Image (cartoon, grey):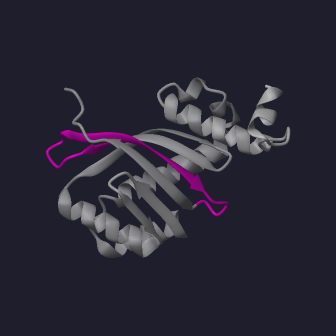
């Protein structure tokens, strides 16, 4: 380990410990999303933080199926930061509440009657992760995935990075 900084031509202080822990937790979350409750990252969950994260995730997931434009815009304003970012691999990258609402409308037009079932919410240090399934109007699951995000001190999402499997779940 001591040879690594010399090999890289850097000082012995490669990464601040907090940055290293965030990177480690993010890597563990991606690698072990189903085992996350048993990881070192989950140990820092606090009941209030987890409760807030579950509430924010629930409201976020429900907004994707809210048909009433006024209710949808009010909901998004409550859980999404003014300059919040949504990213996925389609590739979608939107910034701001109006852009998120527009993306939700596109989703609803493309998948009428679909909704998201979100669960396995985990949170620590202002970050959140959860799994989801997209359920079609007929009740069939179409896609599954996981999202990772960040919640600001006001309790609003400032970023969601969504990963999903384009193949239908096995029956």
Residue 76 left/right relative to 156: left
Residue 51 left/right relative to 138: right
Q: Residue furthest left?
A: 138
Q: Is 162 in the magenta? A: no
Residue 81 in view, yes or no:
no
Q: How far from the left and from the top, in percent, is residue 152? A: 63, 60
User: Can you say whether 50 is above or below 114 in the image?
Assistant: above
Q: Residue at x 40, y 67 (%)?
A: 100
User: Which is the main secondary structure of the residues drawn in magenta?
Assistant: strand
User: Can you say whether 9 is above or below 33 in the image?
Assistant: below
Q: Is 146 in the magenta? A: yes
Labels in figure, total: 0
Residue 139, by quadrant, is top left
* Depth check, front residue: 121 or 24: 24
Residue 65, by quadrant, is bottom left
Residue 71 in view, yes or no:
yes
Q: Residue at x 37, y 70 (%)?
A: 101
Q: Quadrant of the C terminus?
A: top left
Q: Quadrant of the N terminus?
A: top right
* Depth check, front residue: 22 or 15: 15
Residue 149 left/right relative to 143: right
Residue 83, by quadrant, is bottom right
Q: Residue at x 37, y 51 (%)?
A: 89
From which residue to which does the magenta span run? 133-155
Q: How far from the left and from the top, in percent, is residue 68? A: 28, 70
* Depth check, front residue: 123 or 2: 2
Q: How far from the left and from the top, in percent, is residue 147? A: 45, 46
Q: How far from the left and from the top, in percent, is residue 72? A: 36, 69
User: Can you say whether 138 is above or below 25 in the image?
Assistant: below
């Amino acid at each position: 380990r001591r040879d690594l900084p010399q090999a890289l031509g850097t000082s012995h202080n490669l990464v601040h410990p907090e940055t290293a822990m965030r990177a480690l937790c993010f890597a563990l979350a991606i690698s072990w999303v189903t085992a996350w409750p048993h990881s070192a990252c989950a140990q820092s969950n606090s009941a209030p933080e987890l409760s807030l994260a579950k509430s924010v995730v629930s409201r976020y997931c429900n907004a994707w199926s809210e048909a009433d434009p006024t209710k949808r815009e009010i909901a998004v304003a409550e859980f999404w930061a003014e300059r919040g970012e949504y990213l996925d691999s389609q590739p979608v990258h939107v910034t701001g509440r109006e852009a998120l609402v527009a993306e939700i409308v596109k989703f609803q037009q493309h998948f009428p009657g679909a909704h998201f079932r979100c669960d396995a919410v985990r949170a620590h240090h202002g970050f959140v992760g959860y799994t989801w399934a997209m359920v079609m109007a007929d009740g069939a699951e179409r896609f599954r995935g996981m999202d990772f995000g960040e919640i600001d001190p006001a309790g609003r999402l400032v970023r969601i990075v969504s990963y999903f499997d384009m193949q239908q779940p096995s029956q």
